[in-house]
Structure formats: structure tokens, C-alpha cells
Image: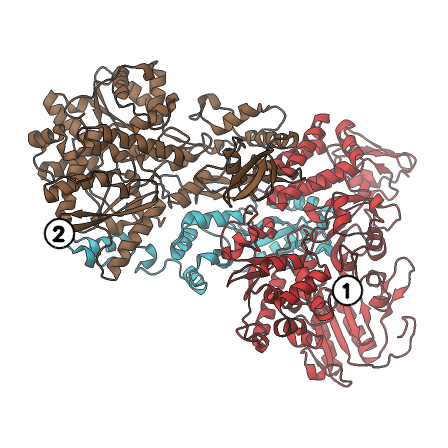
Amino acid sequence: MISNLNLETQGQPEAAPASAPLSKPSTKNSLAPAPFPKVALIIERHGRKPARLVPILQEVQEEYRYLPPDILSYVARSLNIAPARVFGVATFYAHFAIKPKGKHLVRLCDGTACHVKDSVPILDAIRFRLGVTEAQPTTRDLLFTVETVACLGACGLAPVLVVDDQVYGAMTPEKALAVLESVREQERKEPSP
Amino acid sequence: MIGPSTESALPAIGRRRVIVCAGTGCVANGAYPVFQAFTDQIKAAGIAATTEFKAEESDQPGAPLRLNQSGCQGFCQMGPLVTILPEGILYTKVRLADVPEIVASTLVGHDIVKRLLYVDPGTKKPCQGVAEIPFYQRQQRFVLRECGTIDPASVEEYLTHGGYTAARKAITAMTPEGICREILQSGLRGRGGGGFPTGRKWEAARTQRSAKKYVICNADEGDPGAFMNRSVMEGNPHSVLEGLMIAARAIGADETLIYVRTEYPLAVARMKQAVKDAQRLGFLGTNAFGSGQTFTCEVLEGAGAFVCGEETAMIASIEGHRGMPRPKPPFPAQSGLWGKPTIINNVETLAHCVRIINEGAESFRKLGTAQSPGTKTFALTGHVANTGLIEVPFGTTLREIVIQIGGGITDRRGRIGPNNFKAVQIGGPSGGCLTADHLDLPLDYDSLRSVGAMIGSGGLVAMNQKTCMVSIARFFMDFTQRESCGKCVLCREGTRQMLTLLDDIIAGRATGETLVLLEKLAHAVQKGSLCGLGKSAPNPVLTTLRYFRAEYDAHVFHKCCPTGQCKALAKPSIDADKCKGCQACQKKCPVGAITGDRKQAHVIDPAKCTACGTCADTCKFDAVVGV
Amino acid sequence: MITARINQIEVQVPPGTSILDAARRVQVNIPTLCKHRDLLPTASCGICIVRNKGGNKLIRACCTPLEDGMEITTHDREIVEVRRSTLELILSNHPQACLTCGRNGECELQTLAADFNIPLESIKRYVKDVPPDTSTGSIILDFTKCIKCGRCVQVCQDVQNVWALSLLDRGINTRMAPAGDITLAESPCVKCGQCSAHCPTGAIVENDETPSVWEALHDPEKICVVQIAPSVRVTVGEAFGLPPGTNLTRKLYAALRRLGFKAVFDTNFSADVTIVEEASEFIERFVHQRGPLPLITSCCPSWTDFMEKNHYDFIDNFSTAKSPQQMLGVLAKTYYAERLKLDPAKIFMVSIMPCTAKKYELSRTEEMYASGHKDVDVALTTRELARMLKQSGIDFLNLADGDPDSILGEYSGAGTIFGATGGVMEAALRTAYFYATGKKLAKIEVESVRGLAGVKEGQIDVGGAKVRVAVAHGLANVEKVLDRVRDARQRGLETPYHFIEVMACPGGCIGGGGQPYGVDNERRKLRIAGMYQDDADRTIRHSHENPEVIRLYEDFLGKPLGPRAHELLHTRYTARPLYKR
């Protein structure tokens, strides 16, 4: 579509060379409406600066809960940088997810303090109960994603479990499973959007 | 001051305040509902109260009661914490149900609710306030002084505590040379781990000729087991900002940035609010303190990469790239962010600068040791009775920290005992494990380095006798392996191979050659890696090999984990002398591996046993051994 | 100047010189895997560690500048031990498939592993089972052999500005790949093969098509013919131990004939044809003002691919003349077939090219089938040819000189310099000058467009009119030139250039992605010298004077840019902006 536009405007072989109305083509100059208006807005807020790539991706992820490849390409086009750079950054940082995450984010702290207070059996129990692994951290129903986090800075409460934004301290496998059960129960009663 | 045993009414001196700690620990334990309950109950009791700080009201007798949240007060183990001023009463583990009683007894009736006071487990004596609690008594709070009392969301309150006088002085009354000299004289060393003299770093950047320079506050506190920076940012964000402005003035920078770990949402919010407030008051902006100078500050969030704590990786990340370290030289002070001279200082380092400028280098040097002046915050965690955030002068011994402030080492059931201590891990994944032999080692940058550890950013994890040191080494290796940026071979491949070798040891697959190879690789990774992450990655392995060699040998040559933590090597058995034959373990054993009649010593069938450890957890007589 | 000591030897170097480079000046080789002479240090392998003044720290020689008073030790017991450990670690996730690897015998990792005698038993091996990416048909990415040194990424992103390859993921999962789980063919890759030319291992190699050539040679039904590109003659010797720049044109003719080719043609011949067409186009535009200026050369397929993807606003500026490879292909299957009364369907045309993108060019558009058949059947790189010669048992270096086959074999000095950056421009100017003025240039060597500067500019007086030219090589340099043109256009100013030559690879085809391994600027200079020497040695140095070219037009094509020439020798371009860089 874009190429046609460009071709039509420049495709006159007789045009005088110096006066040919040419500008550097770039898909960002597309006349079509932005396919991801919310992303466009985020990028606009950051002044279309490639240096703002990390904060832009953070906000995009907040919007979509992960970074779909189409959107990463769109971000690259909008910032006029290579998708290779955007993907390179998106896959470098642990905070960015290339695959969809579950509705509820279950994060078990595996910082030193939590580790010495036996966080691993809790993690094993949670993963076993939800049927997820390190490689496949999200439940099939997309309800939960289980992650470990290096340190939440709540070492005084070790071991610590965080479900969405709620922090649970002094966990045991039994307590952790009960927390998950309560989330699931809540979902059964009144599913959150 | 009235002792806790006194029943009589307390006199009203100064302004009445109720401070609810809203550090992460207390919040997790329910501090927010407690705060709300106080708001409601105080209103219901008809007491005039406000949650807003107004400078003109402060310390006026008769002013309305002030109710506020504070940053982390450090005593996380005992949260939620509620402090009542002016008496200085500290209530611990306050539940919702306790609030009406506190309001009725203390706020209305001037009585102390004794059951909510902290009881010193040693003397069994209830302590009324921080002055009587050993956890606080041994500390010297320098950067944490205002943390936990002031409302971190109120710049006005910070101002009444002398806030921004240092920045004002630096910007309007001091020369950049003068600031650098003062910091250099103070002997302040970087609190982020390396311990490089801050003044020298500043001076290097100051003397660079460049119209544009940057100061970055490194708040990417990624060490597992460390939360000091978080507490400072949450508890006293303006002190960080003020330090940043002093640094900017010192090197001639106009732009400053704060790079905060994204896992710290509250710290991000507090810092952003602080920046807004400072802009509103004209401290930041084009005419800072009316000096005509420009200072700006922006808060950026990391995106989950430990390696971004490394200076050059952080710069790459801020520039919108993969956070991979680059070779030095050039040092950031010569060519940093966008190729301009840049200094990167840790949160705590900057917070220290505020008081150094206010009180002078000499005052700072009075604390700590000659080579490591000042105080250092530590996150004291693990198997200690009192986990939390502490601040002590350099030169304090491990024993003072772990035993006196930490209240002693707990066993797996949480009981404090004199023989529970096994090791302390200091400095996170870059640090090392120290033993009982080091308990009287005065802690400073150099003493720690001499024993193979480092101060790191200040994570201090105490470990009891039931901790397997090989597992701990594996834990840190797993961490660095995951957090390696992947650029350099030694760090990328070396940490994986070391992890594999440690796994072999833990799983009983190791031979003598495993240990030889482990040491060889550890040495190569330490020597040849490009950045600090790689260079220090082998420290946990090397220190445990050095100080707990016997434990490695037991795993490798005797296929036995002395602590029983390594499941593959565990051989649980029942000590017939201790077993009372209560059958409790039998009932709990998930695989039916335990047999034995009532009141007869039980036996574990090794063929069935999966070494899950349930029996050991169940046995009240510690009769199960080897797991 | 910096004065220091390396292994006790005093060395003086300009400030900013790395320890690695300084050491080379005193005949001390510090081993490295990731540092390429022409590229910035990535500091990733860690093999170049050295020690200063017996200190405890080991520093990296590739990225540490030598400082006054340094006392560098490059080899001691600990340094060598750490180096060995590093190599062991690299080999721990590298397949042990040297014997079947495209880089066997020419691999930097293999060489170091052999030099250091690295054992493989002691360390656990992790070799991922990842299928190679063969999607382009030009370049094969074998991810398992990648050592993550980052050279290819630096070349692809910074030198070529293509951004097809990137480093993805982190830590132990770090990988080199096209971003976003796409194939290389779906990426912005322009198949230039510079990644492969700079890769220290066999992770990026050309798609080896020698089997299909062997098959054709053994097929009695097929009439195999071959053409050799300008630059191949001065580089193929490197594969046989000769210095870069050694001209082996006539040995190549003889060897190719021995391989079984029925006719041996020279791409230099069709380079002359290209010049006749392109110079005519230029005269049309510059003198007769028919068509936009600047005219931009199009014989580099990576460049045309890059242009179609990223700079398609210049489509009308592109010379429509096909590349010499394609011209020779179509002429062999029409003109040559007609003259010799051969069935063009039976002719199997093989081209020996310096280039991986030439493989892609074969089926680039329908115009590449202008003869009614695939004009060129297989394009082999110089490396593949060397492999075939070695397989065939031909004592290449001691062969008696041979000759090319007539009517598509004679070449001028202008045709041969196509292989060097600036060569097409120089050749075109020689002929265009003649076309415009009826006279020859007083000095036919156009020095201003020679050499390795990234962008070269020149001005030639053509019958009173000034022709402003620019030559860019290395695709990252193109944008600078094009942006100047765009800028002038936007301001309504006169175009800053009338004629632009672009070659994708640094140095031009002599630095192509399919040339013998080990390219760096030193080697490029020697190869270029070989090209210009070949030109200087020719008696005919103008394309339009090539007698076989003259005959071609007289007997077959008619006029340059005429209908038949247009049908067979010209092509079209299409904007394909699927991917911004």
C-alpha cells in the first residue's frame, strides 16, 4: 500500500531530476491510521525517541501484558529503528515477555534470604499444582503465570510470595497453595475482567 | 521517660503523632488496614487529627494529632510497627483488632498496651521504644536517620529536618572543587560494592572538559537479599535527590537520572513524587535555589537485568540498548551516557553526601575506620531472630551484627541458640561466605576483600548449622548464570559449567576431578571475565571451597550431605536413643517407609525412603538424622 | 607517541593503539577469536588477556589502549591457563563436526584449538540441536557453530546497516539470529555475505552448490559453460597459498576447461557490455536530459536488494542495465547458442562469483529468464570453486595458461576493474567521456574514485560540463550519499551528483562475501592492486573498444539501449518496503 503510494508519486520517468518531489520513504509516514493507536500514543508521549525504547516497551507491556511480535515491529517502524534492535532489547530484559502471560502473576522470591528459608519446595509445590514449568510458566487457561524473582526486597518476611501486587510473607508450601486456591475461588465467583 | 512497667498516665509532651510503618515488610503484614483503622478509630474517639504535614503546626503543643505512614523502620520481622510520639512507644505486630485498644489506652488514656511491646528474648524484658531495643541500640543511623519517622511523601516535613540545606549550600555557596574536596576528605567510598573513593570519581568527571555531563543514581539494587537502597528511596526519597544535586553541582552536570529497579514500584513512585515536589519548590529546574543554574532529574525504571547495575551496562540500558557491559577504559567519567562524562553513584552513597556537606567531612570520618569511614546499611536476613534493615559504622564486627543486633541465630524451628551459627553470606552473588572464625572480623571494604568476600551492596544473610554450603554456592552460581549478559565466554559458559559441576556434587555424581575442574574454572572466570559480574561470580564458590572444604569433600568422596539438605545424598535414619516411638513420623511419611511399634524405636526403610524430610520436620525429639 | 614494553620489547605507537595492535608491530601475536582487524573490539571472547607489570589483573588486549610505561606480558603460565579454559568453554557448546564443516581447515576456532591442544573430555558438552537456516539459498546460518563473538552482528548492523542479524536473548541463551523468529529470507538480509566473510567459525557459510555443478558436469546431455567474475582472478590464488592480488586469469581458464566446461567465458566481457549500456544511459540522462539524475549503478545484487527494501525512492535513478553475470548468462543462451547452433535448453551456465548474493540474483525477477531459460543456472563463490578445483585433483598452480572461448571471452581493462570499488564508475566514465566528446580521457585512471575511503567523490570535465560522481561501498556509507541527494531535492537544488556507484561490500567485489576467508583492509588493498594491474596490462582499456563487444552489437544486439538490448540486457526494480531496515 505504502509502496504504491510512493511509486505513483515518483513514477514519472520524464520528471526533471532536481524537482522530483521525493522525500525519504519511511513507513512511519503512512497515511493509514496507526494499527495500534494505544501504542502510537505511548510512542508519541516519549517523543518518538529511540533512546526511550525501554520505557516504551514497559508501557506497551503494561497495556498488553506481553509484547506481541507485530507490536514490536510496529514500535521499530514508529521509532525508525531496526526491528532487530527492538527484539534484541525485548529479549534481553527479564521483565519483558514475548509470550502471553496469565491473568494472575504469581512471583515467588528466590532471593538469598528466601532461599535459605526454603523457598524452593514452595516453588515446586506451586508448579506441580498448576502444572507449569520454568520453560512453560503459564497455565493453559491463561489464569496464572508462575515466575521466580531475584529479590523483592522483602527479605524480612522470607519466604515471600507475590500474587499480582499482594505480598504474602513467611510462606510454606501449604500456605502458598491456599493463596492460589483463594485466587481461583475468587475467579470462580466473580471473574475479573 | 516512663518505663514500661509504670501504670500511670503519660504526660503529654510535644505533639502527639502516630506513625505506621509502611515499608514492604509491614505492608505485607497488613500495615495499610491498620493505618485505615487508626484513621477511623481516632476520628471515632473524637480526637482532632490530621494526616497532612504542616510546618507551622509542627511541635506546637495543642496541634492536632498527626497520623502518618513512614518508610521502612528496619525491624521488619516485628511488623506492622506503630510508633507513638512523643513518648516513643513502639508497638510491634499490630493487628487490626489491636487498634481500638491502642486508641483507647494510649491516645486517649495515656497508657501503654504492654502486650504489644517488643520483648527482648534474652532478658525477657519488654522494651518501650527503640532506645531500649537491642536491635536499634547497637545501630548508628546516619543515612537512615529520618527513614521511619518522617512522612516520605512530604517534602515539607523533610525541609523541617534540614532538608535541602546541603544542596542549597553546594549550589549557592560552594564551588565544584570545594565539594569534590570535601567529599574526598570525608573518605567516602562507593556503597554499591566496589568501594571506589567517591571524591576521586567526582574529581575525574569534574576535570573533564565538556559542556554536557550527567549524574546517574544507581538504584538498580539487584542483589538477592539486599533491600537497603529500596528502603532509603521509600523512606527518605528527598535525601537521594539532594545527594544527586550535590553530585551534579560537583562535576558540572545539569542532567541527572535515577535508574530504579522495576521490581520496586513504591520506590519508583516515591522518587517520582520527590522530583515533582523539588521542581515545584524550585530546587530542580532552570533556576535552582535562585542560583541561575539548571538541574533536572528523571526517574527511569530498569527492566529486570541484574547486570545493569554495572555502570556501562546501565548506560547502554538508558540509551535504549541491551544492557551489556562494554570494556573500560574509557571510564564513564570520561565517556559515559551519550559519550559525555558521567558519574554513577549508588543511592546510599548519594544520601551520605547530604550529611557530609551539611556536617563536614570531619564529622563523617568520626564514624567507621580510617580506610572505610562512615556507616553502612545492611539488609540482615536469613536465620537471625531479628531480620531487617540496619546501619552500623564500618569496623563493627560480624558478631555485633548477627548476635547482638540480629538477636542470635535461629535453628530450623526458629529457636535461638548459641551453637546455631554456621556462616554468613555477605555481598550477595559477588560476595562470599564467612565462618565463625570471622565473627570478630571488623567489617570494612579491605578486611572483607582479604578474606575473599566483598561488602557488595550490603546483603548479609546469616545461616544456621542446617544450611548446606554447597547448596548455597550452587544457589549463587545459578543466580549469576541466569543474570550473565551472555557477552563474554568465561562468564556465559563458565558459570554454566560451574553450575553443572555443583549439580554433580549435590547429586552425588562428582569425583575428585570435579573439584579440580571447579576450582580451575572458578579461577579462570574470576581472572578473565570482562565486567565485575563475571569477575566476582566465582566468589561464593571459592569462599565456600576455602572455608567449608570438608563439606565439599563429604559430598564428593563420602556421597553424604552433612546437613541432610541435599536430597540425592540424604540417608535419613532414626536415632534409636532419641526416638520415643510416638509413631508421629510413621503417620506423616508419604511413602510408608517408617516402621516400628509404639514406644519402640522406629526404623526407616532406605529402599522406600525418598528423603523428603517430612519425618524430620514432624519429630519433636530430633530423632531423625541425616535429612 | 606512547612508549611501552611488550614482553620486554620496547614499542612505540600512536596514542589510542590497542595492546593487541601494538604487539603485532613487534611480532608478538596475541591470540583472539572475536577481534577482527577491521572491526571494533566486542571484547567477548576473552582470549586476548594479558598482564601489565606483573599485576594481579588480566586485561583484554583488544580493547585496552597501550599506555606510556606499560610493561605487558602476553604469555605466562596463568594467562595461558585461562586462555585454555576459555577455549575449552567455547568448545563445550561447539559441535565436533570439523571434518564436515564448510570452514574445515580455515576456521579460526579450529586453529586455536589445535594450537592450544585443547582436550574435550573434561568438560560437559552442551550442543543445542537447532536446525540451520537455509532460507535464503545464498547463506546458511548454522546456529550451533556460533560462538557469539558478535562480528557478524557488527558487520550486518554497523558496516552494512542492514540489521538482518542481531543478538537475541540473554546469558547462556544468547543467540545470533534474525530478530523475531523469522527466517533470514524474511529478514532485511541482502545476502551480501559479509557476515560469513567475518565469521571466525563455520556458523555462517555460503550455500554450497558444488554438488549440482558436479552433477551437470557429469550429465552428458548438458552443455556446461562457465563465466568468471572480474575479482575472482585475483583472489582464488589465496585458497592455494598465493598472496592476495595474484592474477590467475589464464590458469583459471585452463582449470575450468579441465573441470569439464565446454566453454569458458569471462564476466569481464559482459562487464564491458554493461558499461556500453550504462554509459549510454548516462549520456541519455546527462547530455540529453532524458531521465532522472543521478544515475546509480545496479550491478551489485545486494545493493539492488537493499535499495528495493530501503531506498526505493531512488528506483528511477537506477541503471536498468543488468549485472555482468546476468548479461553473460542471457547472451550465452541466445547469441552464443545461435552462433554455435546449440540448444539453449541444454546449456548449463555456471558463474564463478565473489559473492553470495549472486546466487539470489539468478532468480531475482522474471528478467533473469530473458533467454527463455534460467539465464545463469548456478552461481558458485570463489570458495566453492577452490573446493572443486581441489576435489578434481587439478594441480592448479602449475597448469599451463589457457584461453577463454571466443565471442564472450575478450575483455578490456575497464571490464576487469569492476571488481574493485570505484571500478564501475571509472570504466563507465572512460566510455561515457568518449560517447560525449568523441575523444578519450587524457588520463584514463580516475584516481579520485580509487581506494578504500568509504565515500569517494570526484568531478570530471566532460566536454565542458562537469560530471560530479560519488562512489560508496559498504552499505552503511550509501545513506550519506543518498541523503545528500534527497536533501538537495527537497530544497529544490541541483543534484549534488550525476553518477553514483554503490557496491555493498567494503572494497567492492574483491571483498565479497564469497571470497577466500580472512579478508581485511590489508588484503583488500592487495586484491585491488591486482585488479588495477590487470587493467594496466591490457592493451584495450575501454569497454567500447572490446572487439567482441563491437561484434556483439553489430551482429546481434543492434544499438546500445536498442530494442533487443532492452529486451535482453535490462531489468526492472520493485519497491518492497516490507521491513524498515
Q: What is the x, y in percent for residue C298?
A: 24, 41
Marks 2 and 1, Cα distance to the nearest angstrom?
83 Å
In the picture, the disc for residue B464 is none
Chain under callout 2: C
Residue C120 drawn above or below residue C35: above
Q: Residue at x 56, y 34 (%)?
A: C47
SS assignment at label 1 = loop
Q: What is the x, y in percent for residue B178?
A: 65, 67
Q: Taking C261 as reference, is C205 left or right?
A: right
**Mark 2 on the same chain as mark 1:** no
Q: Which residue is mark 1?
A: B141
* Quarter where residue B64 is shown: bottom right
The amino acid on which the numbered mark 2 sits, given as a three-letter code, is Gln
Which one is in front, B74 or B110? B74
Check contact, mark 2 vs mark 1: CB within 8 A.
no
Chain under callout 1: B
Q: Can you tell which of label 2 and label 1 is closer to the viewer? A: 2
In the rendered picture, chain B carries what hue?
A: red
Q: What is the x, y in percent for residue B3?
A: 90, 72
Q: Taking B352 as reference, is B320 left or right?
A: left
In the rendered picture, chain C carries what hue?
A: brown
Q: Which residue is mark 2?
A: C289
Asked if residue A172 shows in the view, the reply is no
Callout 1: few (<14), some (14-19), or many (20+) C-alpha neighbours within 10 Å? some
Which one is in front, B363 or A159? B363
In the rendered picture, chain A carries what hue?
A: cyan
Residue A141 drawn above or below residue B210: above
Residue C574 drawn above or below residue A25: above
The amino acid on which the numbered mark 1 sits, given as a three-letter code, is Arg
Q: Residue at x 62, y 42 (%)?
A: B534
Q: Taking B599 as reference, is C55 left or right?
A: left
